[in-house]
Image: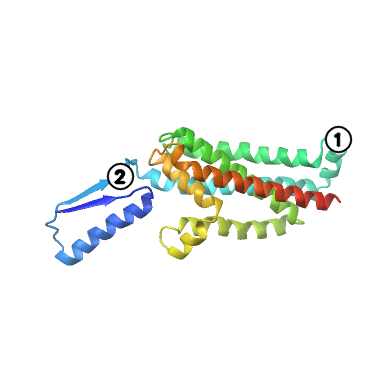
Amino acid sequence: KIQLILDNSSPKQAALVELSLNEIIRNFLGEKKPVNLEVQRLYKSSKDPRKILLPSWLLFAIISSFMIVSASFLEEKEKKTLQAILISPASLSEIILGKIFLGLFLTLISTFLILILNGGMSGNLLNLFLIILLGSFYFCIVGIFISLLASNQGASNTLGSLLYLLFFMPVVLADTSRAMFNIAKFLPSFYILDGLSKALILNFGIGALKFHYLFLFLASLLLLGGNFLILRRQEN
């Protein structure tokens, strides 16, 4: 008899450990497994297999929000309509905040459509909503950062592709590589994906994700401040 006690707070890692143990038993004993394997998980998790991949799909949609914001802002610059807007009482800062909230609105719609169509409206919904909101807000600010640095859509697409790889690949591969994990833990996207998994699959409460919220809030604040510094220099 073997009792396996799993810390399944990281569902993909827990599944890998369970599969690996079964493979070790099979290789050691042959094709037959005359072993009573009892698996005890520390957290009650969702049995729906779709939910294991759902956090990654949500992260993909959340990261994509920077493309919406940067494309919208650069279009104004390229078509010379930004100067016309600036003649109005609205300041450039207000226009940028408007672009951020437009991207945030569209991203929230897309993520909730993904949740509804894949049976994801379960788990701790408050945590789920807050992680999606903070994550989307951060990447909308990334979109403004790209549009301030890039002179045209071509440069924006190149920079956006590089950032997409940086934010997405280390995070989705963090469970399979120690090196990727060490990179991913410094990225906001890591705390978005981990927070989504723990809220959606493991039903974690607010207290368990307080570091995730703090990290995303501070990252958004720093990047927003950086954007306004760049904007001030460009205005001068």
Q: Secondary structure at mark 2?
A: loop
Visible residue check, residue 30: no
Q: Give left or right: position of 91 versus 47.
A: right
What residue sits 41% from the left and 58% below the top?
175
* 27 w.r.t. 74: above or below: below
Distance CA(mark 1)–CA(mark 2): 58 Å
- Which residue bears the numbered disc 2? 42
Query: Where residue 101 sits: x, y (%)?
Result: 67, 37
Pick the front one: 221 or 195: 221
Based on the displayed image, in which of its 4 quarters is residue 85 positioned?
A: top right
What residue sits 77% from the left and 41% below the top?
93
Determine crowd level at label 2: few under 14, some 14-19, many 20+ residues with C-alpha closer than 10 A: few
At label 1, the amino acid type is: Ser
Circles 1 and 2: CB atoms closer than 8 Å: no
Visible residue check, residue 180: yes
Residue 193's disc is: none
- Which residue bears the numbered disc 1? 88
What residue sits 45% from the left and 58% below the top?
174
Q: Secondary structure at mark 1?
A: loop
Q: Give left or right: position of 179 versus 87.
A: left
At label 2, the amino acid type is: Leu
Whichever of labels 1 and 2 marks the residue nearer the N terminus, that label is 2
* 26 w.r.t. 98: above or below: below
Query: Where residue 212 sits: x, y (%)?
Result: 51, 45
Based on the displayed image, in which of its 4 quarters is residue 54 positioned?
A: top left
What residue sits 47% from the left and 65% below the top?
179
Query: Where residue 152 sits: x, y (%)?
Result: 75, 56
